[in-house]
Structure formats: structure tokens, C-alpha cells
Amino acid sequence: MRRKIIAGNWKMNNDVSGTVNLISEIKKELNGKIVNADVIVCPPFTNLETAYTLVKDSSIKLGAQNMYYEESGAFTGEISPLMLKNVGCEFVILGHSERRTVFGEDDQIINKKIKSAIKHKLKPIFCIGETLNEREKGVTFKVIETQLKNGLEGLSENELSNLIVAYEPVWAIGTGKNATPQQAQEVHQFIRSLIAKMYSQNFAYQLVIQYGGSVKPDNAKELLSQPDIDGALVGGACLKADSFVKIIEAV
Ligand code: 13P
């Protein structure tokens, strides 16, 4: 059975004291509860070190929201995989739609980042998803296929053993309008069957595919009960401990 993974993408929210408060509250709320999911928090870069001191004695794991693919050098403003490892990160979100649309990242850059993350033993949370326009034009599967194939180009099944895929329809991100469980399940099933063709049935079966896009305590249970939805990548609702923990409990 695939273990469910709930990750909180804090985006550009919380300073150091906000990070201390939020993680402390999440730990307090989770204390003594039996949780059937792995839990990851992904604060901004400047708060990772603080976050690590708070999660290291707990079951909560730490992720970053992005990274550059080089190890060091003249790349003003960028953060390397070695730097993320150095402050205790185990995961890194790559290819988020905000990186693609606001910062112009394309599939080729994302592919280099995934390769670099794997080389440095960071577990990639690889985001893919169609825009509203693409969904309305009926090209959702085509877009997903292109993003998936380009992003994973040149990587073997063995190298991808720690891959997490996050399906995040762009039209559902931050809009309050989540994909219906049926819409999400349809795409998750498509992703899994495509991965089976690209790699193997066995690899596809064990691959964790998260859903992201307006996941809230009141829709989490139904989304997470779909057969191919193995967790959630949560934005807005992860910024409050009680709603984030309710989503974790929905598992
Ligand atoms: P929201 O949950 O705010 O829609 O954001 C989803 C997301 O982008 C997570 O990466």
C-alpha cells in the first residue's frame, strides 16, 4: 500500500517567529494523535534552519520550495541543493506552477533541477498541471503527458525511487475552486498509467501522486479517498495549524 503524504507549501509566507509559532502549533495539535500519513512542511528558504531545529525531534519532515540545479557559483539569488541538504531538507518542490508562470521556468530547467535533486539525495515533489484554458480546450492529458515526459527525461526508474508527483491544476490553485474528486482521480489515473508505460507497472503502483489546488479540511477526505490520490500538497490551508492538521487527520 502507498503511504499517504501531506505536504504544506507555505509559499512566501511567515517570517522566523511565524515559523516557530506555526510548527510549534502543528506539533502540539499532532501530539498523541495516530497519524496515517507522512507530514512535510516547506517554509521559505530563510526559515529552513529554524524549522529544522523544531522538526528534527518529531515525525515532521522538512522540504524547500525550489532550488537551482548547480552546486555553487555565480548564480545571484539562487539556492543550491547542497545548501538545502546542509539545513536539513529532505524534500524539494520543483516545477510548481508559480515557478513556471511567474518565473518562467520551463520543462527543461525543471528536468535539470530534478536530476540535480536526485544526485544530491533530495526527494523531488514534481508539480504538473494544466491551466483553465488548456482544460477547456480539452488538452489536459496532452499537457500532463508533455510535462511528465520532459520533466523526467533521461531518468531511470531506479533514480526516481524517491519521486513524488503532485498534480496541481493551475485553475484550482489559490482560487478556492478545487478539482472535483472525479476530475482529480481521472488525471491521477492517467498519470499512473503513463508512468507504467514509461517505466513499469510496479514502479507506477508504488509512485505517490499528490493532489494540490484548494485542498481544505472540508474537501480533503473525499479527495484523499480516491484510489489514485496518495496525499495532498496544500497551500493556503497549511498556514493555520488547525486546518493543516485537519487535512492530515482526513487521511
Ligand atoms: P492552494 O492550496 O492555496 O490552492 O495552493 C495549492 C498549491 O499551490 C500547493 O503547492
Image (cartoon, rainbow, N blue to C red):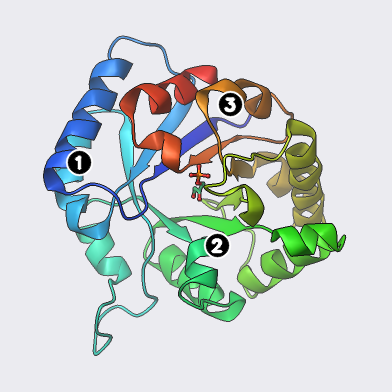
Q: CA distance from mark 2 to mark 3?
A: 21 Å
Report the amino acid beneath label 3. Ala
Q: Which of the 4 image quarters holds residue 93?
A: bottom left
Residue lying farthest to the bottom in this orientation? 74
The foreground one among 203 and 186 is 186
Q: Residue at x 70, y 40 (%)?
A: 179
Q: Residue at x 36, y 65 (%)?
A: 120
Q: Identify the residue position indicated by label 1 in the image.
A: 19
Task: Residue 102 in the image: state x and y as whole percent.
Answer: 48, 71
Report the amino acid beneath label 1. Thr
Instruction: Find out whether the residues at labels 3 and 1 contact each other: C-beta distance under 8 Å.
Output: no
Identify the secondary structure beneath mark 2.
Answer: helix
Identify the disc placed on residue 125: none
Mark 3 nearby-residue class (10 Å; few <14, some 14–19, many ≥20): many
Report the amino acid beneath label 2. Ser
* Image side of residue 102 versus residue 142, left or right: left
N-term mark: 2 or 3: 2
The foreground one among 84 and 251 is 251
Identify the secondary structure beneath mark 1.
Answer: helix
Disc 2 residue lies near ligand 1 with CB under 8 A: yes
Residue lying farthest to the right in this orientation? 138
Task: Residue 152 in the image: state x and y as whole percent.
Answer: 63, 68
Q: Quadrant of the N terminus?
A: top right
User: Where 24 falls versus 129 (above or below)?
Assistant: above
Mark 2 nearby-residue class (10 Å; few <14, some 14–19, many ≥20): many
Q: Which of the 4 image quarters holds residue 27?
A: top left
Identify the disc placed on residue 97: 2
Q: Quadrant of the C terminus?
A: top right
Mark 1 nearby-residue class (10 Å; few <14, some 14–19, many ≥20): many
Identify the disc placed on residue 220: 3
User: Where 223 falls versus 176 (above or below)?
Assistant: above
Instruction: Find out whether the residues at labels 2 and 3 contact each other: C-beta distance under 8 Å.
Output: no
